[in-house]
Amino acid sequence: MNEVKTSDVTNALKDIVKFTMLFTVDEAGYVVNESDGARITIPVEDRRAPILLYQEEIRDQEAQILNPFSEGQGQPPSSHWLYRALKAALLGRIKMIMEAVIKAAIMEKSKDKKADDSKRLPMAILSLASLIVDEADAKALQELDQIFANRSADEFLRTYYEKRNLRCNVSSGLFDPEEENSLIPSFRSKFPTIRKKGWGIFEKLLLGILGVNDKDKLAQFGCGSDGTTCPRLSSFLNTLLAIYRPVNELLCHINDGDDAIDLSVLAYHISNIPAYANNARFLVQPYKAPAGSQTPVASSATPPPAYGQPPAPSIALVPAPTYADGWQPPPIPVAVQPSYPLPQGGYATPGMYMPQPTGWEAYGAPRGYPSQSPLMPAQPLPPPFDPPYANYTVQNQQPQWNNFVPNMPPGIYR
């Protein structure tokens, strides 16, 4: 695709959102629940905003624009939502396969199973069930639900972006080493009620679903970006494509294949990421600064603070740190204390070096001594106008330290 229109980018985003399984897009371009059509909102500052796809005409200034192709503008909350939704959809599909395999294993070893060939599962599912037929039981299904009901379920199969290498890596918390006295809890330690047998079932099923026989081979599903255009999106979607290839073959045998995705559509959009980015990379998300973050501007109605009084601090927006998965929160408001105001009539300009007063000027030029510093203009005082040492005389005054004999002429010492 040499040249794309904005409508092509919008249609690509619609297809990507549909891969999330639970969400879709309405006619106006808002992301909605597929079940009831309610608009999805995400937290932005002190409010919740709907998610609107990048499109030709955007009128809703309160909505968060979903445009992952503008990575140069940072990581807005809408793009962060999309990455998390795609990860959750992948884990949800893997959970569906595991449930079907565990149920098939329980049915195969039950004594009262019915030999109905028309309802038997395909060989792809039964071959996985044979891996756990001895350990599978009903409690394993409950333990599986316990894991995926927890907020740490995304560690079951991690897909995280490594910015330094422009690569999306893959790992699993199931195989994290158990370290005693570790400050960071392991994935398994978050589920103390799950049996050791249950962990063994999940390990075998995850490796079997992905078609590998060793935990170290999970890294082979990680993919780098196709170039420097949208490296995070490119590497992430390529990683999803690599994982969905074995997963999709099993999804086609569950629920009549309704939960499988069209890999050709995903591959098509991945190949056109540079063209999409050329159209959408320059969109800047309207950002509404938090209340009270506007820098006060001096005007004739608001006089500047008096000399010697600290001015009111202003607020500057500092970029927030970027997390390991690439998400960057909104800018952080930070108070900035400006410099003290100069007296009116001074000669200072921004960036100009102002020498510090020395000598009599440091004391405000007492007794009308003429000051050359713009920081301390001379104040009119009554005469005399001479410096104070001009009124000091040594006549008829002898230093007491240079004559040890009374009534002797000065300069004679004993």
Image (cartoon, helix red, strand yellow):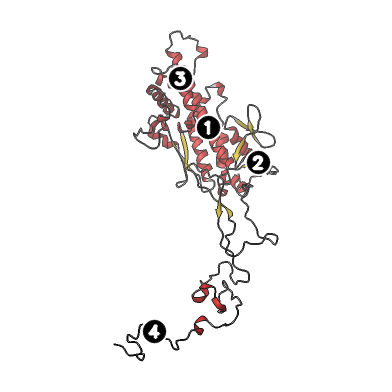
As measured in the structure, the alpha-carbon distance from the residue carrying label 4 to the one carrying label 1 is 94 Å
Numbered mark located on residue 88 in the image: 1
Q: Nearer the viewer, residue 24 or 323?
A: 323
* Quarter of the picture holding the C terminus: bottom left
Numbered mark located on residue 399 in the image: 4
Tag in front: 4 or 1: 4
Tag in front: 1 or 3: 1
> Quick check: 130 above or below 278?
above
**Where residue 31 appears, x then y in whole percent?**
63, 35
Q: Which residue is mark 2?
A: 63
- How would you rate the neighbour count of disc 1 (Cα within 10 Å): few for under 14, some for 14-19, many for 20 or more? some
**Amino acid bearing label 2:** Ala
Q: Is residue 248 visible?
A: no
Q: Look at 59% across and 36% down and name the residue there.
A: 16
Would residue 403 appear left or right of 87 to someone viewing this image?
left
Sequence order check, earlier mark of 3 and 4: 3
| Secondary structure of the residue carrying numbered label 2 | loop
Q: Which residue is mark 3?
A: 102
Q: Contact (CB < 8 A) between labels 1 and 3?
A: no
Residue 395, by quadrant, is: bottom left
Tag in front: 3 or 4: 4
